[in-house]
Image (cartoon, rainbow, N blue to C red):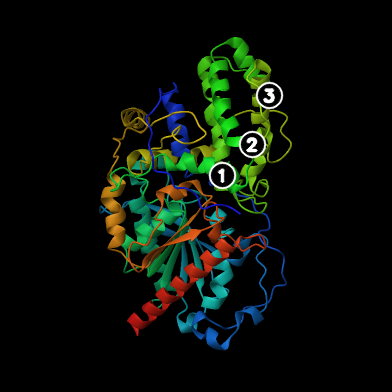
Amino acid sequence: MQASTPLLTGRPRAKKMLRMSSSDKAAITIGLLSALCIGSVLYVARTIALPYAAPVATSRSNLSSTILSELPALNFTGDLRARCTESYFVQTLNHFEAIPDTYSQRYFVCDEFWQQSSSGPIFFYVGNEADVELYLNHTGLMWEHAREFGALLVFAEHRYFGKSVPADAARHLQHLSSEQALADYAVLLGHIKRSLNATSSAVVAFGGSYGGMLAAWFRIKYPHVIDGAVAASAPVLSFVGESPPANLTAFSQLVTYDASPAAGSAANCAANVKRVWDVLFDAATTAAGRASIQDGLGLCSALLSEDDALSVPEWAKTSFVYLAMGNFPYPSSYIMNGGSVLPAFPVREACKPFAPTFPLTEAGNFSLLVALRASVGVYYNSTHDQPCYTRSAPSNESQMDADFWDYLFCSELYQPQDQGIGDMFWLDVHDQTADAARCLAKWGVTLRPEWASTVYGGRKALRASSNIVFSNGNLDPWAGMGVLEDLNPSVVAVRVEGGAHHLDLMFSHPLDPPGVKQARKEELKHVAKWIQQAKAASA
């Protein structure tokens, strides 16, 4: 059984920092929230195939006379886009100035379960930094409970992502912001409610990761538009200016927890991973060492310089980061965007090559490199057909998404990370001055380290808000910067024992741990309460 994750806050004396290039240091921070969003969006079945039957007219409000378990089972396999209507809505490019520029925002409406005549609620997915089709096809919590609530499902795409990219977007990046996205969602909901005669319908927002942050901020900024928000794996307390300060070491510490025996991984894993970085850094300094890295890791191309070799640790660490976020209890394609399938508990699989004891010799060091090759292969060779690792750049579309996220990071959502303190990684402490210089050089913007805390208010604003559920799994690296305790009677924290990155939003699965099942029950209890409150207020 897994122990409850230690959300570490201690900060021992820092050791001498290892030299890394500024782009390497920024890469993992910039890309973490985009981890779920890179690559083309492909789809595989998400649930056990069950016989499909037409929806039965029932709702959460009359469940006393209807037993859900007696209703026909629903089948949510395949591409769920076929069950929705894809539309585009013309949005103003800048909601905060009177300018004529517009763009087309994509959204999907799925109405097969909607009880329009009884003002059934609207379940609204707050799109984040990717093609919204990814979330439409994986957010099972909305799909599986739409029938019992009689809910209309809406999946809205975030501006500048997917197919909601303004013309000549790179020249108008000043209009890419979370504030503009939230205004988009508020205006879009108004349009949907008017056009579908749904002005009396309650609205509940759902989101995970950055989408979870947006869902919470949506409730804070537009409480007259949405009646509640389920914010899963939302690191809303990850920003500079928080009080108490954000725990910048938590992410790497929780990745390390996933690689520990407490989370079911091999006993030697974290210690051997910690050691392999020194092997890489030492080998990077000589031509012979760089050849050894290429040979041991199975890299397709030679490492031509020390700087080239020093980028390898970040590349390798990225695999552990993604695997920890996708450390689900069953095989899943979500982290791989449907293109391939990761095994159940993939961090445990990645730790198996590090189970032995490696001698402190040159041969032992090379064996560590070979172990690292097998370990990162759980992620980088999830298709099981890669003869060597290219470390190549992603597709053009993926690169554009990553670039736009980098702009958000620089312009308003600065989330620095520290590592090497109580974890299995090398020491690398963020440098705000260097980050500011990089952002200015790349985007021509001035870093605003405390803007997110200023505009959204952090804990203080959350305590003054209402009707938000924050869920965090003990296997999710982002949990250490999320809301882990109730902030008031209706802004509540739900712990998801056995859950990785917003597993509670996914489709139910026979291998779901009890903690995930319980978390979903708690979330739905709040959703039902918010809907009843909204109905009572409009009566």
Tag 3: amino acid: Ser
Q: Where residue 237 sits in the image (x, y, percent)?
A: 36, 49
Residue with the mark numbered 1: 258
Tag 1: amino acid: Asp
Cα separation, mark 3 vs mark 1, equals 23 Å
Residue 280 location, quadrant: top right
Residue with the mark numbered 2: 380
- Residue closest to the eye, 383 or 500: 500
Mark identifier at residue 367: 3
Tag 2: amino acid: Tyr
Q: Residue at x 57, y 35 (%)?
A: 270
Give the quadrant of the N terminus. bottom right
Other-residue count near label 2 (Cα within 10 Å), few / some / many at <14 / 14–19 / ≥20: many
Please say if the residues under marks 2 and 1 sit with CB atoms less than 8 Å apart: no
Residue 498 location, quadrant: bottom right
Q: Residue at x 37, y 78 (%)?
A: 533
Q: Is residue 444 above or below residue 55?
A: above
Q: Residue furthest bottom?
A: 65
Other-residue count near label 3 (Cα within 10 Å), few / some / many at <14 / 14–19 / ≥20: some
- Residue closest to the eye, 381 or 509: 509
Q: Where residue 464 sits in the image (x, y, percent)?
A: 27, 63
Cα separation, mark 2 vs mark 3, equals 19 Å
**Closer to the camera: disc 2 or disc 3?**
3
Q: Is residue 347 above or below residue 426?
A: below
Residue 516 location, quadrant: bottom right
- Residue closest to the eye, 7 or 342: 7
